[in-house]
Image (spheres, rainbow, N blue to C red):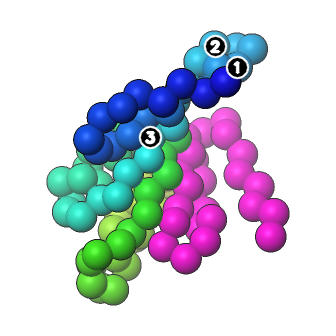
Amino acid sequence: MAKIEKTTAPLTVDLPTSSGEKQVVVSYPKTFEDIQKLILNLRNGQSVIFKLTGITNSMAQRMIDFMSGAAYAVGGSMRAIEENLFLVTHQGVGITVNK
């Protein structure tokens, strides 16, 4: 069962696997400083789920572009899960979205 670490933000979820524990960071970024922290998580091998709410459309688009570039830089992927909700993974993690 996944262990959820209770913090203010971002939330980190530990997912035990046969090859060791993997972490997924869940966040609701409001500033580019928040996005930079998520990119550090991504660079450290953690997948990131983020939801863009409470910000302007132009700010949201800039954040999406920034995270997309970070995913590309680490050889990873970024996919929209639903409106304003995104999953970003590092290299070696595939994403499949069933709708």
Q: Position of residue 74 (x, y in %)?
A: 48, 43
User: Which kind of residue does numbered mark 3 sit on?
Assistant: Val
Q: Position of residue 49 (x, y in %)?
A: 49, 51
Q: What residue do we see at 70% from left, 14% from top?
A: 19
Reading the image, the residue beneath label 1 is 17
C-alpha separation, residue under disc 1 versus residue under disc 3: 16 Å
Q: What residue do we see at 55% from left, 55% from top?
A: 87
Name the disc covering residue 63, or none.
none
Q: What residue do we see at 56% from left, 45% from top?
A: 89
Note whether residue 95 is visible: yes
Q: Nearer the viewer, residue 90 or 37?
A: 37
Left or right: where 37 falls relative to 61: left
Q: Secondary structure at mark 2?
A: strand
Reading the image, the residue beneath label 2 is 20
Tell me where the magenta segment starts and ends, as one range: 74-99
- The answer to whether the residues at label 2 and label 1 have Cβ atoms under 8 Å apart is yes
C-alpha separation, residue under disc 3 versus residue under disc 2: 17 Å
Reading the image, the residue beneath label 3 is 25
**Quadrant (top left, top right, bottom left, bottom right) of the C terminus:** bottom right
Which of the 4 image quadrants contains residue 79? Answer: bottom right
Q: Secondary structure at mark 1?
A: strand
Name the N-terminal-most of marks 3 and 2: 2
Q: Is residue 98 above or below residue 27?
A: below
